[in-house]
Image: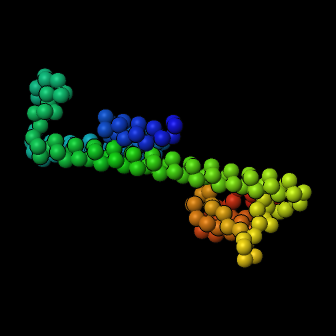
Amino acid sequence: MRDQLRPVLAAVLALAFPGLGHLVLRRWGRALLWHVTVVGGGVALLTLYDIDPGGSAASPFETAAALPTEVALPVALLTVLSSIDAFVVGRADVAERKRVDATAEAVRRRAASADDDGGAVASPVGELTGDDGEAARVECPSCGKETDAELDFCHWCTEPLPWADAE
């Protein structure tokens, strides 16, 4: 449940303050990039249109309402894009975490079934074969692509597989 709310929280915080939603997701570079883009774009537009936002003693909301459309619209658009990016990145993090958990659970189940059979195998999935006698294939926890279960590393991303340390 908490994982499902994290992308929404990141999107709302990114709307409130540019870059804050990415900070919640622990994406430091993206947070800095979005903050600099939105604030820097706003300052550049204010300079371009020769507007002095600090000239009046009004509240920040009155000052924002007094900005011309040529300044307010691009800043609002950048803020909304930052919020959408925070939501998408949050959803991708949740999906990756679920995929890694599912792969780890599958490896754990296969290791337990290999232990129940009494046979000692080099890897938890070493003796699994498909219908046609080929080696079983599992998802890599790092990249999510299907890889050969007999290998100790993913042949796509070259990351070691969880059972490589068991030997």
Instruction: Determine the residue positioned at 57% across, 60% down.
Output: 143
Residue 133: name its quadrant. Answer: bottom right
Q: Which residue lies furthest to the bottom in this view?
A: 132
Q: Which residue lies furthest to the front in this view?
A: 131
Q: Can residue 37 be seen in this view?
A: no
Residue 75: name its quadrant. Answer: top left
Please say if 6 is above or below 164.
above
Q: Is residue 45 visible?
A: yes
| Marker count (numbered) | 0
- Quarter of the picture containing the C terminus is bottom right
Decide if residue 64 is on the left or right side of residue 104: left
Instruction: Determine the residue positioned at 40% across, 39% down.
Output: 8
Front-most of residues 88 and 30: 88
Please say if 7 is above or below 159.
above
Please say if 82 is above or below 136.
above
Q: Position of residue 38 (x, y in %)?
A: 27, 44
Decide if residue 96 is on the left or right side of residue 74: right
Instruction: Determine the residue positioned at 39% across, 45% down.
Output: 86
Instruction: Determine the residue positioned at 72% across, 55% down.
Output: 107
Front-most of residues 37 and 130: 130
Q: Where is residue 158 in the image (x, y as percent from the top left)?
A: 63, 65
Asked which colour scheme the image uses, the reply is rainbow
Q: Position of residue 154 (x, y in %)?
A: 65, 65
Decide if residue 2 is on the left or right side of residue 19: right
Q: Position of residue 104 (x, y in %)?
A: 67, 52
Residue 10: name its quadrant. Answer: top left
